[in-house]
Image: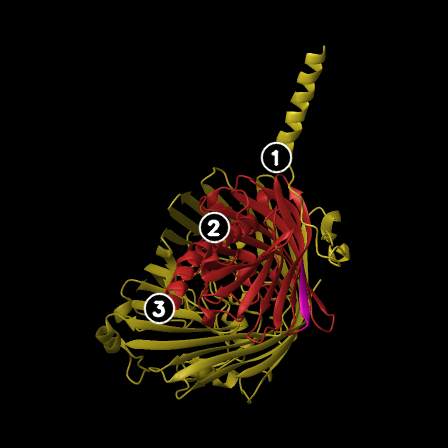
Amino acid sequence: MKNLLKLTLLLSAVWAMPAYAADTKNVMEIVKQANHVSYYKADDGRAKVNMRIIDAQGRERVREFVILRKDDDETDGKQKFYVYFNKPADVKKMVFMVAKNLDRDDDRWLYLPALDLVKRIAASDERTSFVGSDFFYEDVSGRGVNEDIHELLETDDKYYIVKSTPKDPQNVEFTTYKSWIHKSTYLPIKTEYYDAQGETLRSYTALKVEMVGEHPTVIASRMENHETGGKTLMNYSSVKYDIGLPSNIFTERYLRKVPRKYIR
Amino acid sequence: MNKIFIAIAAMSFSQTVWAQAIDVPDLPELPEGLGDLSSVTESLDEQASLPFDLTMSWDMRAGVRLQNDAHEKDMSLGETRLQVGIVKDFDTVSFNFAADFVLDPVADIYAVDLETGQGFIDVREANIVFSPIDFMDVKLGRQVLTWGTGDLLFINDLFAKDYKSFFIGRDNEYLKAPSDALKTSFFFGDTNIDVIYLPRFDADRFIDGTRLSFFDRASGDLTGRENPVVANRREDWFDNDEQAIRIYRSFGAIEGALYYYNGYWKSPAGQNAVTGNAEFPRLHVYGASMRGPVAHGIGSLELGYYKSAEGADSNPFVRNNEFRFMMGYEQEIGTELTGSVQYYLERKSDYDVYRASLPHGAIVDDKARHLLTVRLTKMLKQQDLKLSLFNFYSPSDKDGYMRFNVSYKLRDNLKIEAGGNVFYGQERYSFFGQFKDNTNLYTALHYDF
């Protein structure tokens, strides 16, 4: 009897396994697709970004910058970002450049025009505030799809609801996060980050989606920090894809000499 | 007839299907309550009416010495400056202009000297930038120039510095004094070359006693504004010129560079044996640097050989040849906390000849000067509050210099700061020790229009 029970358990496990594997593959495809539409649309792109950082007391800070992005190849892997600041005034004309790597820390540079200084910045913690906002660096440049274990919790008529658990919990402030990924566009419309007690730490919401060429694009979003009571509203304008950015834009030459043509 | 109709219907039908297949996917219906787009604001281009890009800021600062200095005023700093920056872009050329309009009762000199930055106007930029061919950039005119890998330490960056501003607590950007130069850059894919020509020598804005007291080795005593340095500036156009070349390329994530400089010591490094005036002896520098990711941070390495004027080793009035070396490491060591360390070495060549050449009783410098620096930068309150600390310590000179600064942004365009420059040392003639009486605290208000 005991043996029979064991056998049954074993058999059910064997039966269950392929199903589980299929599910994992499935959810991985969803997550990869969501990552693609969020961070790797077309070969390159540009946008004007306006950020309003509002703290719990309602005080507001504004950041305005132009962001240029180019992918190294079609693998949704390495890519480069060029961020030219317009606001606030004390960072105006500064340039922040990132070469995103998957196998090691990103390379980051900062150009300070008043000193004509090209500074290399030590990058390690991706989960710190981007320019003082409630968005983290990783929210802006993307989190590696292999850094978490993903699980498809639910599928309703509009969304895939995916729960993601970090493989290396030491490196992140959350325990899990949940994403509502829109079924036909694969855009994450809502993402909530939770701590071990299940309390929501931060939540991201897409506020407005528009077609830019053939790419559905989130052009307004919000990140709320439930611990501080602050929030950041991010708006994209003048979004363009496939603008034919030369790859040498992402070199020291154009840190020192702004590529006006693409920044305007 | 019917057949034709069916055919057309079928065609248009198939077209519709085809269009649907590739056309707009259903855009996500945003969760209820999230359709409120009042938060969506288009950025307003406030400067749309101006035919050029204008930046203006207003800065007010005051500082005091923490001890009595017999050679200087008690106020180390007391000034207000309006900075105006104008950029005008055309298709192929852009013009840059930036100047400070200064009211400085501590200096109390209003006649303008664009070289020394003295007076009520300090022009920091006045240049044109263009690309005559696609692999070449040219920047001509007054500009700020920087290269190299050090953090507040420079080996191969022989462009003018302003140590007065640096030591009394002006904004960091003033450490760099402008140069009047032609900068030509060539970009050959992987390898790039910068060639910089200064038709007339641009000295550092060095410590000359007018603002900070220092140890005068000739008189063997501290001195200050009662007896400022008289320097024989090298002012002959095209004769007293400077050339600086950098060849650089990346090897994966590692950046490498070679440097050459042909000009003069940027701060006085010699003395006229007859008049006693300070001089800027000839100088050639050959150097190299490397910078790239190391462990979880950025590592850097730089070296240079300073070849002084002919016969410098046996001439007590001219600074010797030197080998200089520096290595640094920076890493994020906590949340919004960055730390960095640097080691720096200055080593005299021909030390025995140097010693033998010194007159009896003269101060003898060590063969090597070692320097360690530590930087800590912490950001708080969503990066509105910034605490920074930078310390130079020389175990060989047994002296040092600590800079600290706290700044807080009350609004995006309004910042208050306070900081200090603390000099310490055992000897009153050592590099930092001589500035002990200049130890100061300052406070500032900065407004951006």
Which hue belongs to chain A? red
Residue B217, horizontal then vertical, whole percent: 39, 80
> Magenta span: helix, strand or loop, mainly?
strand
What residue span does the magenta drawing correspond to?
A229-234
Tally of marks: 3
Left or right of residue B84, residue B35 in this image: right
Lower position in the chain sequence, tag 2 or tag 3: 3
Q: Are marks 3 and 1 on the same chain?
A: no
Q: CA distance from mark 2 to mark 1?
A: 30 Å
Q: Which mark is residue A79?
A: 2
> Going 53% across and 39% down the picture, which residue do you hit?
A244
Which residue is at the front of the view, A92 or A104?
A104
Q: Residue furthest left?
A: B352
Picture residue at 36% right of the left edge, 55% below the top = B257
Chain under numbered label 1: B
Rendered shade, chain B: yellow
Is residue A147 positioned above or below B396 on the image?
A: above
Secondary structure found at label 1: helix
Q: Give the labeled residue for mark 1.
A: B21
Residue A230 magenta-highlighted? yes
* Residue B25, position as x, y percentages in the image: 64, 41
Left or right: where B415 falls relative to A170? right
**Amino acid type of the residue that numbered disc 2 sits on in the rendered structure:** Gln
Magenta stretch encompasses residue B6: no
